[in-house]
Amino acid sequence: MDHAEAFQGNEREIVTFRVSDQEFCVDIGYVREIRGWSPTTVLPHAPDYVKGMMNLRGTVLPVMDLSLRLGLGATEATPRHVIIILVVNDMTVGLLVEAVSDILTVSYEDMKATPDIGSTETKNFVEGFFTVDDRMIRVVDVTCVVPANTGEPR
């Protein structure tokens, strides 16, 4: 699914999750499944944020440490962590996160822009944010976070 297809109408469903004790989300249209942490196989010379590869019912896919990818430090994965399996630009990839929190329906018009005080990478990786009750939920731009060359065989 491309980025434009993820936004159907004014409302969208998002999956919220925690990374480094902070709240983020992705559009549910990208999510294939959510599964518990399982050890990965290290891939030599992969970027540091690629934890390794996993076999998901015959499909070998990279698992990225989203915390490290976002510049928030490495995650020491435990059985309490989860992997969100995404399909981005016809590529399947796993994101290691602390926990999935909610599935929410939000209005696309309510998304606030990422402040200009952030770095270029911040604006590339964080598309904007939603405020829900007292929560600020950052929207991860999965098309930027998931590079085209993470090592998944085609």
Image: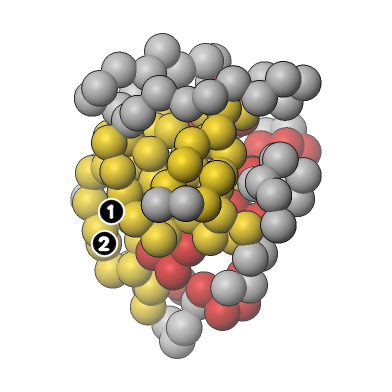
Amino acid carrying mark 1 in the image: Val
Res 114 visible? no
**Residue under the point 40% across and 52% down:** 57
The answer to whether the residues at label 1 and label 2 have Cβ atoms under 8 Å apart is yes
Q: Nearer the viewer, residue 114 or 40?
A: 40
Picture quarter containing residue 104?
bottom left
| Residue 44 in the figure: left or right of residue 24 | right
- Looking at the picture, how far across and down is residue 17, in whole percent? 33, 41
Q: Nearer the viewer, residue 143 or 39?
A: 39
- Looking at the picture, how far across and down is residue 37, in whole percent? 32, 30
Label 2 belongs to which residue? 104
**Residue under the point 27% across and 36% down:** 36
Give the alpha-carbon distance from disc 1 to disc 2, as whole Å: 9 Å
**Relative vertical location of residue 28 with respect to residue 18 in this rendering, above or below:** below
Q: Assign a secondary structure to mark 1.
A: strand
**Relative vertical location of residue 127 with respect to residue 53 in this rendering, above or below:** below
User: Can you say which quadrant of the picture contains the C terminus?
Assistant: bottom right
Picture quarter containing residue 149?
top right
Q: Assign a secondary structure to mark 2.
A: strand
- Looking at the picture, how far across and down is residue 109, in whole percent? 47, 73
User: Can you say which quadrant of the picture contains the N terminus?
Assistant: bottom right
**Residue under the point 62% across and 58% down:** 91
Label 1 belongs to which residue? 132
